[in-house]
């Protein structure tokens, strides 16, 4: 009976862990099109720049645009790390619950059975005295 309960508990923990993983999963962002757009605009502006100061301004704009994209990439990476930490914490918690319930179930099984030779015999429940009024 304890094995069936433990098995059902593990199934429940697996379902809970899967739900946690799905809840924390996110799609990675692809910023390559944004980089291509920024470089394309920079190239167009570079072609229209006629002097060194105008080229410096164009380079400043493209640097600003690329730094903005890098900031978004770092934000996405930070969110992914946070999701991973939460998922690993959830897995550790679920494993702790499995270990605790297994230990408690083993202790209960040991308390309710007695080994006689090579055969395990169930111990009857303790006798209780009738309640007096």
Image (cartoon, rainbow, N blue to C red):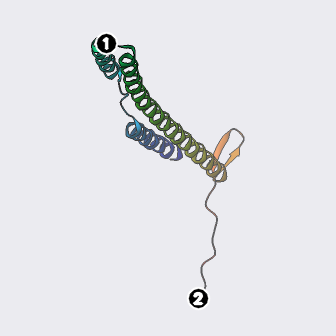
Residue located beneath label 1 in the image: 50
Task: Identify which residue is drawn at 54% across, 41% down.
Answer: 89
Residue located beneath label 2 in the image: 133
Work out which residue is located at the far right of the displayed protein and give it: 117
**In the visual, does 85 lie left or right of 49?**
right
Task: Report the label total.
Answer: 2
| Residue 3 screen position, x and y as percent | 52, 42
| Residue 125, numbered label | none
- If you read the primary sequence from the N terminus, does the residue marked by circle 2 or circle 1 appear first? 1
Q: Is residue 61 above or below residue 96?
A: above
Q: Nearer the viewer, mark 2 or mark 1?
A: 1
Q: Quadrant of residue 51?
A: top left
Q: Are there few (<14), some (14-19), or many (20+) residues within 10 Å of tag 1?
A: few
**Dividing the image into 4 quarters, which one contains the C terminus?**
bottom right
| Residue 116 screen position, x and y as percent | 71, 45
Q: Quadrant of residue 35?
A: top left
Q: Quadrant of residue 25?
A: top left
Task: Identify which residue is drawn at 45% across, 36% down.
Answer: 79
Closer-to-camera residue (107/78): 78
| Residue 99 screen position, x and y as percent | 60, 43
Q: Secondary structure at mark 2?
A: loop
Q: Are there few (<14), some (14-19), or many (20+) residues within 10 Å of tag 2?
A: few
**In the visual, does 21 lie left or right of 88?**
left
Task: Identify which residue is drawn at 43% across, 27% down.
Answer: 67
**In the visual, does 105 lie left or right of 63?**
right
Q: Secondary structure at mark 1?
A: loop
Closer-to-camera residue (38/82): 38
Give the CA distance from mark 2 to mark 1. 107 Å
| Residue 82 screen position, x and y as percent | 49, 38
């Amino acid at each position: 009976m304890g094995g069936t309960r433990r098995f059902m508990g593990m199934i429940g923990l697996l379902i809970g862990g899967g739900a946690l993983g799905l809840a924390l999963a996110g799609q990675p962002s692809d910023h390559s099109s944004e980089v291509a757009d920024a470089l394309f605009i920079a190239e167009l502006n570079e072609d229209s720049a006629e002097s060194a100061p105008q080229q410096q301004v164009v380079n400043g704009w493209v640097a600003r645009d690329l730094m903005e994209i890098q900031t978004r990439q770092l934000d996405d990476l930070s969110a992914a790390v946070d999701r991973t930490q939460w998922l690993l914490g959830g897995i550790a918690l679920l494993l702790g619950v499995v270990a605790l319930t297994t230990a408690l179930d083993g202790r209960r099984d040991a308390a309710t059975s007695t080994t006689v030779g090579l055969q395990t015999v169930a111990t009857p429940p303790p006798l209780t005295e009738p309640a007096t009024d």
